[in-house]
Image (cartoon, helix red, strand yellow):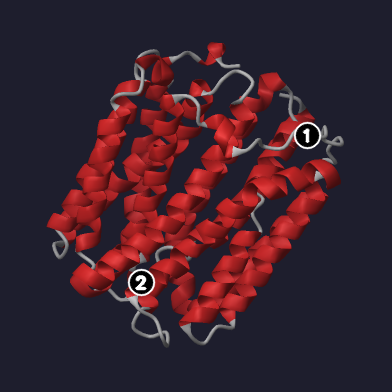
Amino acid sequence: MTAAERRSAIALAAVFFLRMLGLFMLIPVLALYVETLPGATPLLIGIAIGVYGLTQAVFQIPLGGLSDRVGRRPVILAGLLVFAAGALIAAAAKSIWPLVAGRAVQGVGAVSGTTLALAADLSRDSQRTKVMAIIGISIGGAFSVAFVLGPVLNAALGLGGLFVACAALALAAIAILFLAVPKPPAPARGAAIPPLAGTLAAPELRVLYLGVLTLHLVLAASFVAIPIALSEGMGLAPSRHFTVYLPVLLLSIALVGPLVMASARGGSMRPLFLGAIAGVAVAEGLIWLWWDEPAGFYAALTLFFVAFNFLEASLPGVISRAAPTHGKGAALGAYSTFQFVGVFLGGLVGGAVAGGLGYAAVPAGCALLCVAWLAATVRVPGEVLTRPARQRG
């Protein structure tokens, strides 16, 4: 990797980190406002969590195409500004519907695909996997930091202040984009992510996209319920939620690292991948079973984060191996779209289940959904999960 490629990878990873940090900080916090925000219900809080994913899914591909015509940086700039504007709309909200509107506007700044395209523009084919890995690590880091920092900032600043912090992080990402990211070459016209239909021909890809959607549905739905369990079931003040998330996340990171390294060895990915899906299912079942038992609940939460982080790190590579040689860009673009659709559905379904059956029913439903995902994934051909990296197109 050249110095320029290394600089580009680190700078774009920082852009991703700041943007995703702002998003992830809200996940463990929003459900806590179901009883204090005027007009809020479990369903509407779930929509507030998930609507961002809906607008992301709608705008990812059009903005990727636009970046081919006007350039990557202008589109990323506009997307980050829209994201910041949505955060400020939500910060000013005094009831649930303006909050939902602000979250929807945040999602319109859908520039994940464009930012990945910029990373591709600034790297050689032989180094692209390393660049994407650096960006992937930054997203995982943002997830871990956010689950600790979100409750702390929420206690200090309130929900409005947390959204203002999201806007500030987006502006910081803009500064890095223009000060640290090298100017890219003009992208080739027509290099946008192709429509989803062209990526759905292979049955194994359809199953993997179902997995992407399910994983993020389960994440969003779970965090409609988990903050309530910590507050009501465990009697833990919201300002103290970080005392649960911090040790759980640190332990999960320590366990995920060896699993990711082991998955790179021949023949190890398939059992680890299927085991991680089973791990999410078991974790959700144990969260339901130990809803008001702190020790068991924390152990289940640790298992959830270990399995989730392993799958989050592995799915892009698995999808890339399953994709046709000349369709990897389309496949990874579809990955982003299904990811955000899952976030939307998770917030919607989690809120609906919590409102109709109670919060404890949410992890039970997620466990059953993961069992169905596991049953579908077992049928994916073994070579999709175990093909060596040198065969990738």
Residue 248 place in picture, x, y as percent: 32, 52
Residue 42 place in picture, x, y as percent: 33, 73
**Which kind of residue does numbered mark 1 sit on?**
Gly
Q: Is residue 376 above or below residue 127?
A: below
Q: Residue at x 41, y 56 (%)?
A: 345
**Which kind of residue does numbered mark 2 sit on?**
Leu
Q: Residue at x 50, y 64 (%)?
A: 51
Judged left or right of residue 75, residue 315 is left
Q: Quadrant of the N terminus?
A: top right
Q: Quadrant of the C terminus?
A: top right
> What residue is pinned by disc 1?
190
Which numbered disc, 1 or 2, marks the residue that appears first in the sequence? 2
Q: Nearer the viewer, residue 382 or 261?
A: 382
> What residue is pinned by disc 2?
43
What's the CA distance linking mark 1 and mark 2? Answer: 41 Å
Q: Residue at x 56, y 35 (%)?
A: 197
Dots 1 and 2: beta carbons under 8 Å? no
Q: Residue at x 34, y 22 (%)?
A: 270
